[in-house]
Image: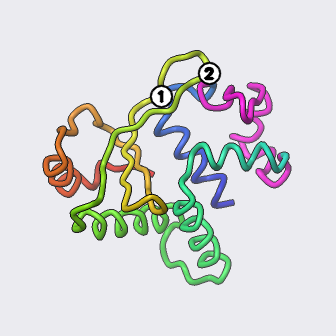
Amino acid sequence: MLLEKILLAVVESRFTYDKDFFENGGFKSTPAAWSRFKNGEVSINDMKYRKVSNMLSYLFTPLELQVIEKVQFEENSNWLDIDPLKRYKNIKKELLKEWLELSYTAISLQRYSLPNGSQSKNYIMVKKDEYNSITFGCKSTGKIPAGKGNRREWILKNIDLLEI
């Protein structure tokens, strides 16, 4: 299932250890239950609605969830000629390129607060307005310069470093 693949890819790119994600209070899971999910033994459809809802709202913006639904629809309709994960990433990058042309687009580095009190790896939040935002993991967030213009320029030059 596409949602499961994207969820696992995001967790992998933004958390050093899986337990930093699955021990979160809003959707706490045991190591064994997480392992069964990660290995495909348990579907996201078999989990409690509230747990899934909390995981999704923790990891994804509302716009990203809409993009996932769009890609899922395209896949179910046999319209996709590329890997669904790649399609999801491409849609987000297309939005990013459009938004970076707008003067009011905000780019910031974010982190998740972890259950042990520490922070996750940095990820990039690109916000067009209060309703539209997308996030990206990045292999080298430590190299992203400060300043609105500098960040825009760096992202456009290094767009291939951006992860789901």
Residue 56, compared with residue 86, is above or below; it is: above
Tag on residue 120?
A: 1
Residue at 56% from the left image edge and 83% from the top image edge: 79
Residue at 43% from the left image edge and 61% from the top image edge: 89
Q: Amino acid at mark 1?
A: Ser
Q: Secondary structure at mark 2?
A: loop
Across and down, in percent, residue 115 comes to 62, 21
Q: Which residue is mark 2?
A: 115
Q: Secondary structure at mark 1?
A: loop
Residue at 80% from the left image edge and 46% from the top image edge: 50
Mark 2: few/some/many CA within 10 Å (<14, 14-19, 20+): some
User: What is the number of callouts on the image?
Assistant: 2
Tag on residue 27?
A: none
Decide if residue 94 is on the left or right side of residue 158.
right
Give the mark nearest the N terminus, 1 or 2: 2
Residue 142, compared with residue 151, is above or below; it is: above
Residue span colored magenta: 20-47
Residue 29 colored magenta?
A: yes
Decide if residue 32 is on the left or right side of residue 64.
right
Residue at 71% from the left image edge and 28% from the top image edge: 25
